[in-house]
Amino acid sequence: MPALHDLKDEDLQGLAPEAVTALAQQMLQRIRQQAHEIQFKDAKIEKIMFQLAQLKAWKFGAKTEAMNAEQRRLFEETVAEDEASLQAQLDLLRGATPPPETTGENNDKRKPRRRPLPEHLRRVDHHEPLTL
């Protein structure tokens, strides 16, 4: 009898019942073996995917995005300034405090510390339409 993978339609004609039974057993055994191989490969793929997810979490996780001391200090200062500014705007809108004066010691902090642009530079004014 030829090997299972070499069988053709013509070979199946006129087989004895014992040969058909033996052929069916071979086919079932091969199917079980392939199912076992598929399960093994699926488990291996799942393991590799899990390891890849762990690697990505390690590489791109929050730990790598942590701030150093200087960045944290600057961030906290910015947050404090923003919070104070928003609180002042909120108080102004509620009418709790009068608007800050245009002259005074506190306004000197908010003035830009850079020099004005030189006079020889060309200036272009851009005006955008107001939207309501």
Image: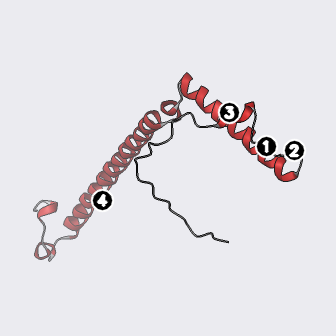
Q: Residue at x 56, y 33 (%)?
A: 113
Who comes first in sequence, dot 4 or dot 1?
4
Label whose residue precedes the other's in the sequence (2 or 3) = 2
The mark nearer the N terminus, 3 or 1, is 1
**Which quarter shows the N terminus?**
bottom left
As drawn, the label of residue 97 is: 2
In the rendered view, tell whether residue 115 sits above or below residue 4. Answer: above
Q: Residues within 10 Å of mark 2 (few under 14, many from 20)?
A: few
The amino acid type of the residue labelled 3 equals: Asp
Per the model, the C-alpha gap separating discs 2 and 1 is 8 Å
Distance between mark 3 and mark 1 Cα atoms: 17 Å
Q: Is residue 61 left or right of residue 98?
A: left
Q: Are marks 3 and 1 in contact (CB under 8 Å)?
A: no
- In percent of width and height, residue 61 lies at 49, 36
Q: Name the image quarter holding residue 23.
A: bottom left
For residue 7, which quarter of the picture?
bottom left
Q: Circle 3 sits on which residue?
A: 108
